[in-house]
Every structure is written in structure tokens, then in C-alpha cells.
Image (cartoon, rainbow, N blue to C red):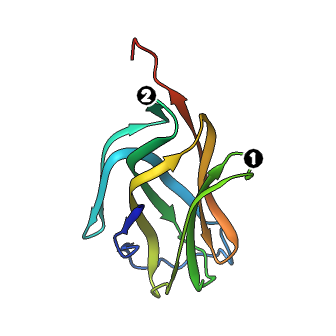
Amino acid sequence: MVNLIITNFLANFALCKKRNLTTQIMYPEILTLCEYASETNGKLTIVDTFDSIKASKFPWRAYFSIAAKINMEGCEKSFDRLTFNIASDDNSEKIFEASSPFERMENMQKLNVVAGLKGLIFEHPGKYCFEIFFDKQRVAKHVFKVELRNEKD
């Protein structure tokens, strides 16, 4: 069973500075796989980052976290839904998807997203990606590998 823990999509608030920008594209400042992540009072804690998951056999039941910090500064658009998914890199196999209503606070400049994934099953080795969407607009994508562990690892 997959147990997703998302810390309320907690945000780091900052006062909005007046700028001459009409719109700015949101982008990830941080986007990583890790052993553990948490968010407390706008502080993002990330422990042991990595780019690949090593499996001793397949199918593999993985336990890991994902941490992201999305820069929304200058973006005036509001969104209704935050969606997070993990799929094969070619999108032929969806591994996981979670979606939640999202209400952007007036002065929100940065958004910390933390997801703890417990027992996510990867049937075979390959390239996978996780993505974060606001409504249907992708704002972050990270590609990672799930591979068979060598005896030397």
C-alpha cells in the first residue's frame, strides 16, 4: 500500500515586492529525491539526496521522499489544483498520482512541497520521472533511474 504524506503544501511567505513584471514563469529552485524531507515554518529540511534508486530485485518496493521548492515570485496567476505524479519517462506507465485542491495565498512567493512515498512498487528497471502540475500546467519535472544494484554497491 502506498502511503503519501504531503505536508499541506506548506508555503514560505514573503512580502510581495512591486515589480514591473506582468507575468513570470514559475520554476523549481529545488527538486530532488531523498531519504527524508520535512517542512517546518517555511524551512525545508532534506536528508541524503540521490538520482537513482537501487533495487536488489524486481518488482521493487521503494521507500523515499521527494522535496521541491517552487519559485512563484512575480507570477500573478492563481491555481485551483496541485497534482503530483510519477511515471515512466516515456509516460507509458503511470506509477503514482495524487491531486489536491490548492489555494494560493495573496503574498505567496515560494512553495515547499514534501512527499513521503512508502511502498511504491517499481515493476522493472528504467527511467522514471516525477512531475508537479498547477492545474494542467507542468512546473517541475525530474528524471531518475530505478536500477538493479550491483554486488559492489
Q: Nearer the viewer, mark 2 or mark 1?
A: 2
**Residue 42 horizontal/vertical position (percent):** 30, 68
Q: Residue at x 67, y 64 (%)?
A: 138
Q: Amino acid at mark 2?
A: Ser
Residue labelled with disc 1: 90
Q: Residues within 10 Å of mark 2 (few under 14, many from 20)?
A: few
Please state which of residues 120 and 26 is positioned toward the viewer in this rendering: 120
Q: Earlier in the sequence, mark 2 or mark 1?
A: 2
Note whether 19 is above or below 104 in the view shown. Answer: above
149 horizontally vs 137: left or right: left
Please state which of residues 15 and 45 is positioned toward the viewer in this rendering: 45
Note whether 96 is above or below 34 in the view shown. Answer: below
Q: Residue at x 70, y 74 (%)?
A: 136
Question: Is residue 55 among the parts visible in the rendering?
Answer: yes
Q: Which mark is residue 38?
A: none
**Residue 153 horizontal/vertical position (percent):** 39, 17
Q: Quadrant of the N terminus?
A: bottom left
Please state which of residues 24 and 126 is positioned toward the viewer in this rendering: 126
Q: Amino acid at mark 1?
A: Asp
128 horizontally vs 100: left or right: right
Q: Residues within 10 Å of mark 1 (few under 14, many from 20)?
A: few
Secondary structure of the residue carrying numbered label 2:
loop
Q: Quadrant of residue 23?
A: bottom right
Residue labelled with disc 2: 56
Q: Quadrant of residue 22?
A: bottom right
**Residue 111 horizontal/vertical position (percent):** 44, 69
Tell me the CA gap for discs 2 and 1.
24 Å
